[in-house]
Structure formats: C-alpha cells, structure tokens
Image (cartoon, helix red, strand yellow):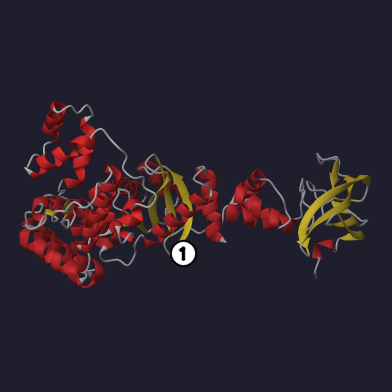
Amino acid sequence: MLFPHFSAVLVERVFTECGVVRIVARTLDGAALCPDCELPSNRVHSCYERRLADSPIGDQPVLIELTVRRLYCGNGLCGRRTFVEQVAGLTFRYGRRTPASRRVLEAVAVALAGRAGARLAVTLHSAVSRTTLLRLLMALSDPYWEAPKVLGVDDFATRRGQHYGTVLIDCETRKPLALLPGRDAGTLATWLREHPRIEVICRDRAGSYAEGARVGAPQAVQVADRFHLWQNLGTAVEQCVRQPTVCLRSPGSGLGELPDIEPPSGREMSPIEARVRERHAIVHALLHQGHGIREISRELHMGGNTVRRCARAATPEELLGGRQQPRPSQLDPYKSHLDKRWAEGGTNAIQLHSELQGLGYRGSYQIISDYLRPRRRRRIRVVGPAPPGLRQVTGWIMRHPDRLSESEGKQLTEVFTRCPELEAAHRLVRSFAAILTTRTGQHLKDWVVSARAEELPGLHSFATGLEKDWGAVVQGLTSHWNSGPVEGRVNHIKMVKRQMFGRAKLPLLRKRVLLTAAR
C-alpha cells in the first residue's frame, strides 16, 4: 500500500548513504511485451542497471538502483531486434526519475516555471535545472475542452505598447481556451471558423474583434461589454469637462500672501546665523498659519528634512549649536555708516557699495549684501487651494451621488453653477447608468436623442460610436452575458507574466495559463 510501484520488482537491499536512501532492486523473471508488436518474449539479451530518482522519504532523497533486462523480440516481421523491459509505475523510456517524481516536478513547473521552480525543487529533494522544468512543462498536453457556446474575447499585452495577443475563454466554465498571437480580425476569424458551434461572443468595443467575429462566426450574437461601455462614456465626459476648463477655477482661487516676517534684532550676527534665524522664523510663521511641511518645503524651495529640523526646533539657538562666531572682516570699520544709511532709507546694496568704495572700502559687493540680508523684509507667496482638476471633476460626475462626500458634492454643485453644460452631462450620465444597471437597453434610443439635443461634442461622439455598434451595444445592455470572466483571466495572465519577469514567449505563457487554469 505504501510502495505499490515496487510490487513488480524484487527489492534486494535498502540502506542510507551520505543522506540518500538507496534502494537496490531488480526485475522479476518472466516474459515481457515488445513495445512495437506487443509479442511476449523471455529471451534475455543482457542486463544493465538504471538509476532512478524517486519521491523523498522522511525528508531524505531516494535513489533507486534497478537492474533491468534487455530481451530479444521473436517476431521476424517486427523492426525491433531487442527491447528493454519497463516496470509499470516505476520506469518509462529514457526516464531518469519515477513517474511519481516526474508528476511532482510537472506540478512545480506549471506553478512556478523555470528559476523559481528550480529553487523549490531543491527544497523537495528533487534538484533539477530550470531548463529541465521548462522541458517537462512544454511536454505536457493541453487540457481537453468542449467547443464553447459562449465565447469571451479580449486582448492582453505580451510587451505593453508593442506586442499584444488575444485570449479566448469559455464564459460558462470560465476556463481559457486559447492564447492567439496578435489582436487583428484575421487571427480571430480563422479560429472561429475552426469552431463553428459558438452562439454568443462577448467582446470589448474594439473594431478588429467586431470584424473578426462578423467574418468568422456570422451566426453568433455579439455582446458589447457593459464595463467598456461605461469606460467609453467616462472618456466622453472627460472631453466635455476639458472644453470649459476655464470655468472650473473659482473666482477666489489664486495666490495668497503671508504677512511680512520681521528680521531678528540684537547683536551682530554672521550671514550663516542670520540665515538660520530667518529660516526658523519663516517656517514657524507658516506652521502657525496651518501649512504643512511638504507645502512649506515646496513654496520655499527647501528640502523636507531642513523644514522638519526648523519645525522641531523651538528656538533658533537649537539650530545654531556649534556655529562659528563672526570673524573680523573688511566691512567692520564701515558698518556704522551702513547702519546710518539703512536708517535713512538707503537700501540699495549696489549704491551703498559705491559709497563705501569712495570711503576707502576695498571689499566685494557680496560682503555688503550678506550683511544687509537679515534686515530685509521677505514676502512669501503660498499657493491657495487649487481648483478641482479635470480628472477629479470627471470622477465626481461618473460616480453615484450617494458615494460623494459632503465636500465633494458641494464642490461639484459649485462647478455646475459656473458650468451649466456640465450639469446636463451629469444628468445624461445618471440616465445612462440607470439603463446599464437595470439592463433596459430598449430605452437607449431615447438616451441617444437626448444626448444629441445637448451641446456636448464629447457625448455626440459617444452616441455616434454606439450607433455604429448598435446591435452589440443593445445586447450588452439587455443580456446577462459580459466580459467579466475574460477580464479576470487577463489579470491571471499578468500574474503569470510577472512571475517570469516578463521574459516568457507566447508558447510558454500559453502553456502555463492553460494548465494553471485546468488544475
């Protein structure tokens, strides 16, 4: 019961060597069937030993040393002269592991593919290379499936923006059927001709899939997915919001100004100390007015950590620890003159520099500018609350009114006051949502007439697109079939791709997707 595959052999010895359980066995005497003509034979040609890896026992790897016979085939009409006997459940042609061990590695390959599977196989005491796992995976046969009646079609990216494929699933069983290269109409039409029993095709709004379904399965009913209809409506509403963007800005929005920051007074300071004190005063003034660290850092063009240090320091002296005292400079004899001229209203550093040069000053202009910097009054502009953005207003219009917060509802009402045409778009969105959720597609014609009566070019384009695909759209708004299972399968394909770091070609990706869904 524990080792049924050893029932057809004679186990001679079991021992442990170097952490490996070794089983020495040989086949039993008797006739064996030729694999070609199936004629029994017991004429022994020779014997040799096969080494087979088996499933681990007690967290120890197992190695089977099996002696098998090579026999003559007695059928003169058979093209095979000799053959090697196989033990059911234990050996197969050219196999270096038992079928049980092979099945474990196949499951690992389906779940994890190459490198990740090889790492797990080491833990399972079945060390193999990544290429061996890939060979085992590609050798597996595709799962069997019956011809579907309801087919789901969607595209997926093998390399986003460059290469795409098409996934086909059975919407009733939700299992993938095929992964096709490309997303053109011809590829889909060819596959549909090979499977003529399809009655319903669920697809997105892509024109290539509509054409492929029409050519390959003219008898099938096409169903446009409701999610994609809503997504297309959102794009149309965004175009409507984009046109009157100027009226989204409220009259009171703009730049505000903070009160002046008074320069620190007291003893003579070095330029560095003056800059630190000024920065500390400005940061704390802005914090007191309710501005955040990130906003202050963005407005003052300072690093976030610098603003945090200033905010945590209660006094400027905490930031001045270890600062050097001011050193003697060429400006010392002329500071009294500068103070006098500043008090008289002379604040132009260039003019003061010229005056000091007439008095014998030989220093640079920068020294005078650094000395006067703490005395200057600095005005800081902080950006006021920004008006609602394009995508934000579009989201408010597309969402159900019950799911808007009180502030969002208030802002949306203000937008409608400034942009009456957006209120009409909101009314049309709500009526289309009612048709979509209740699946009353018979009212769609009235909705199109109402949309064309408003001056909303974005919704006019959306209505034109509905009329071009009218049959599938009406089916999508009345039938219970949709592309939800296909979208879920696309997410599964993305997960499998990321497991392989996006390096898998379509054959390997297809094999893993089909087998993963079948297990």
Residue 312: give x, y in percent of width and height. Answer: 34, 60
User: What's the residue at 14%, 42% (across, down)?
Assistant: 339
User: What's the residue at 61%, 47% (across, down)?
Assistant: 115
Q: Quadrant of residue 407?
A: bottom left
> Is residue 283 depicted above or below 481 in this figure?
above
Residue 488: give x, y in percent of width and height. Answer: 42, 60
> Is residue 403 depicted above or below 169 in this figure?
below
Q: Nearer the viewer, residue 368 or 46?
A: 368
Tell me the amino acid under the disc marked 1: Thr
> Can residue 50 be seen at all in this image of the molecule?
yes
In this figure, which residue is indicated by the disc labeled 1? 173
Count of number-bearing discs: 1
Looking at the rendered image, the quarter that the N terminus falls into is bottom right
In this rendering, position of residue 418 left or right of residue 69? left
Q: Report crowding for label 1: few under 14, some 14 to 19, many 20 or more residues within 10 A (C-alpha).
A: few
Dot 1: element: loop
Q: Nearer the viewer, residue 2 or 145?
A: 2
Q: Nearer the viewer, residue 339 or 186?
A: 339
Residue 321: give x, y in percent of width and height. Answer: 38, 52
Looking at the rendered image, the quarter that the C terminus falls into is bottom right
> Can residue 466 be seen at all in this image of the molecule?
no
Residue 127: give x, y in percent of width and height. Answer: 72, 51
In this rendering, position of residue 393 left or right of residue 145? left
